[in-house]
Image (cartoon, rainbow, N blue to C red):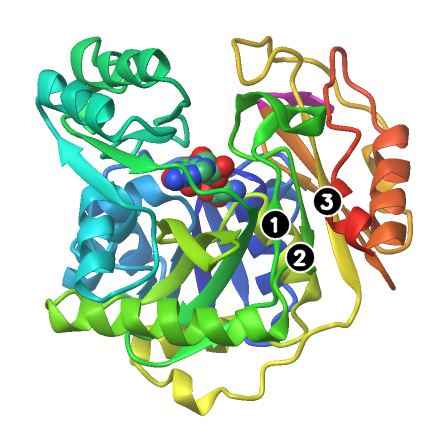
Amino acid sequence: MNILVIGQGGREHTLVWKIAQSPLVNKIYCTPGNAGIAQIAELIPIGDNFAELADWAESSNIDLTIVGPENPLAAGIVDVFREHGLSAFGPDKQAARLEGSKDFAKQLMVDNEIPTAAYQTFDDPDQAIDYIKTINTSVFVKADGLAAGKGVIPGRTIEEATQAVKTILVDRTFGEAGDSVVIEEELIGEEASFTVLTDGSHCIPFVSSQDHKMSHDGDTGKNTGGMGAYSPAPVMTQELHDYVMESVVYPTVKGMDKIGCLFKGVLYVGLMITDAGPKVLEFNCRFGDPETQVLLPRLKSDLVPLMMACIDGTLDQHTDIAWHTDAAACIVMASGGYPNPYQTGKSITGLEDAWSIDGLNVFHAGTEQDGDNIVTAGGRVLGVTALADDLKTAIEKAYQGIATIHFDEAHWRKDIGYRALSRS
Ligand code: AMP
Ligand code: GLY
């Protein structure tokens, strides 16, 4: 098979790395890609015009296109590929609203009795502020649309929540994504990510994982795309796993089907494990980044037939998916300053030494080739990922990998996995 991967982050490098191991795969292309992906796949310089991409895929005999990020999914790339008679993995535009509109997701949860925080949606700032004053409790204020993970603002006091409403609805910091806000009550507990593959009817759960969203140690600093991840997440017991499948995953997939939005692809459920049980924080319509970096190295089975089965509606024929028992940890090396403005073009050294450590993978995110050098080209630069018998050893090995790599002003968290380690 010839495969096209869309995207350029650590998630996409991990996807390319995993599918390159499939005996079914002949050639992998990626757009736009990064320096790490270029070592396995051919990067193709086509812009993000979906019709042009689909024309290229058709003339290049692409058998499967895998869409990594949420933006092209929400903008309908899968619909365009389908119209060209091409197989593309991921939800169509209607179904991608599960991530693309927080209000849509909340309404779906209410309609299907899926556990989540109480909420209201507003497009009028005065009404939103009145509501905040009435409920007088700690809230999260969320831009309705896609805002690259930055559209969620805590409002722990009335003043903070009011400011958040103004930032989104009045200052329009997130543009159209902030046409309306979802205000929801704060949930207290430990977070976990739950990832499933679905063909719109059947679901295959992945092993559990957890990311670290805040930029600095002790979960301080600013919200980022994710500074590291680990799998398994010990907070997700078998009992909770079964509960989430029954009370969240199946009701979501069935609820989407009921309203004519068959959801095919990856359903990522962000959960808060509260004293009253797991509640949904968010849905994503694609693999998590950096969760993918710890999930796919643990997957023993071939991912390609699973993805094809999601598209074909035959996922029930794949009940035998296998996992490595090893634990995995990923530590993100970021550019100094990230998630605030940062410099790029810093030369990266030590990558080969890190790759040569047994069980260590260095997944590239913001990197590019500059002559003979690989240089930084984004906020999150590398996801240094280790597999080992247990989580503690995996984390130690990932930090050993970090110690061999250098670029100016590199920044990484020193406490990845601390919650999981404190449980054991
Ligand atoms: P989201 O993109 O909606 O998952 O929000 C990003 C992050 O904000 C989550 O991973 C949580 O850490 C936090 N968050 C969002 N909503 C809530 C909530 N209702 N209660 C507590 N934390 C929240
Ligand atoms: N790591 C969280 C996300 O991918 O949205």
Q: Nearer the viewer, residue 7 or 333?
A: 333
Q: Say which quadrant the C terminus sits in.
A: bottom right
What is the magenta range? 371-379
Task: Look at mark 1 in the image and give the residue it sits on.
Answer: 210
**Would residue 223 appear left or right of 232 to someone viewing this image?**
left
Residues under numbered marks 3 and 2 in contact, where contact means CB atoms less than 8 Å apart: no
Mark toward the start of the polypeptide (1 vs 3): 1
Q: CA–CA distance between discs 2 and 1?
A: 6 Å
Amino acid of disc 3: Arg
Image spot of residue 129 (x, y percent) = 18, 19
Task: Look at mark 2 in the image and give the residue it sits on.
Answer: 233
Q: CA–CA distance between discs 3 and 2?
A: 9 Å
Residues under numbered marks 1 and 3 in contact, where contact means CB atoms less than 8 Å apart: yes
The residue positioned 48% from the left and 78% from the top of the image is: 305
Task: Look at mark 3 in the image and give the residue it sits on.
Answer: 419
Amino acid of disc 2: Ala
**Would residue 234 appear left or right of 401 to someone viewing this image?**
left
- Mark 2 element type: loop
